[in-house]
Amino acid sequence: MAIKKILVTGANGQLGWELSQLAKTLPAYEFIFLDRRQLDLAQPASFEAIIHTIAPDLIINTAAYTAVDKAETEKELANTINTIAVQTLASIAKKNKIRFITYSTDYVFNGQSTTPYLPETKLAPINFYGQTKANGEQLALQENPSSIIIRTSWVFSSHGNNFVKTMMRLMKERAELKIVGDQLGRPTYAKDLAIATIQMVDALNAGKTIQGIYHYANQGETTWYDFASAIKANAGLSCNIVAITTKEFPTPAIRPTYSVLATDKIENELGIVIPSWEIALKDCMQILS
Ligand SMILES: NC(=O)c1ccc[n+]([C@@H]2O[C@H](COP(=O)([O-])OP(=O)(O)OC[C@H]3O[C@@H](n4cnc5c(N)ncnc54)[C@H](OP(=O)(O)O)[C@@H]3O)[C@@H](O)[C@H]2O)c1
């Protein structure tokens, strides 16, 4: 069945917002964006009635419990939103012949690899947030094997809370910033991820078989220190940035040393070329300036 009506959760998040901007240029699709007040992922019992009223052809679940450090203590809520809600959405989608796309994270891996993680790399969540996302992935696929799960990492956007906006604020306020320099990953521009998601929907409508786990992140890899240095250069700021080690910056949730996702599968299946994180950062900062 062709996908026309698309329900998007998490309307005010980075990815949800980028999808809402993109949606304005896509008259072939009818989008319904719901924020936390309209669809609360902490209330899975409410989903069925809301979804029946809207009757979408596809659910794109961008909402999530994303407070990685807080998840270490707010375990029940993180589990409800990232695991039970995802399982419930997948199950309702299956029952009603609705396609289902949801997102996951590089934190489902242990962070110890030295080569990029493949979609099929063995799961070993590095922290509780990662555990809730890994459980959500597995239960969604168990309930509904045609679910599509897109793992991503280091998400930034001109909208919402993220590293780029925090760095820009702090670099204006402070003379010096200490940034972790021994963690390697792939930044992801939510605007590019939104575009790739729609390319996936177009591919589904073209009859392509797409299901299971995919990785999406911008091309290239970097450290938080180098990412911060690029933000500083783009903004023309003069704050001194000092590289520190993970040990010098302890956080409640453990962070991965190596967090690079391999994106070949999504590139090959969709026939897309993912922009580099440097180009993506420039675009984002132009919007912010
Ligand atoms: N951000 C990252 O660096 C990152 C990295 C890897 C994977 N991911 C994954 O990528 C996806 C998109 O993330 P993002 O960066 O767009 O996240 P985000 O900017 O933190 O947005 C998350 C959204 O979820 C909403 N939300 C939280 N609890 C909710 C609830 N109980 N009911 C309904 N909505 C709720 C938030 O609502 P409010 O606006 O009301 O707070 C927010 O709009 C998520 O699955 C996330 O886990 C993100």
Image (spheres, rainbow, N blue to C red):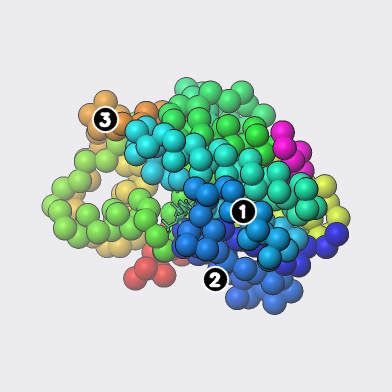
Q: Name the kind of residue labelled 2 in the image.
A: Gln
Identify residue for label 2.
21
Give the residue at x 61% y 23%. 122
- Name the residue located 72 percent from the left edge and 67 percent from the top edge: 5
Q: Nearer the viewer, mark 3 or mark 1?
A: 1
Q: Earlier in the sequence, mark 1 or mark 2?
A: 2
Determine the secondary structure under disc 2: helix
Alpha carbon distance from label 3 to label 1: 38 Å
Q: In the rendered view, would you say 227 is above or below 126?
A: below
Q: Position of residue 57 (x, y in %)?
A: 75, 61
> What residue sits 20% from the left and 60% below the top?
172
> To which residue does mark 3 refer?
250
Q: Is residue 143 magenta?
A: yes
Q: Residues within 10 Å of mark 3 (few under 14, many from 20)?
A: few
Marks 1 and 2, how far apart at CA = 25 Å
Please identify the quadrant where the C terminus is shown: bottom left
Q: Amino acid at mark 1?
A: Phe
Residue range in magenta is: 142-148
Is 235 drawn above or below residue 97 in the view shown? Answer: below
Query: Which-is-in-front pick, marks 1 and 2?
Result: 1
Secondary-structure class at tag 3: loop
Say which element carries label 1. helix
Residue 242: name its quadrant: top left
Give the quadrant of residue 206: bottom right
- Residue identifier under label 1: 47
Indicate the position of residue 209 as horizontal and vertical percent values.
82, 47
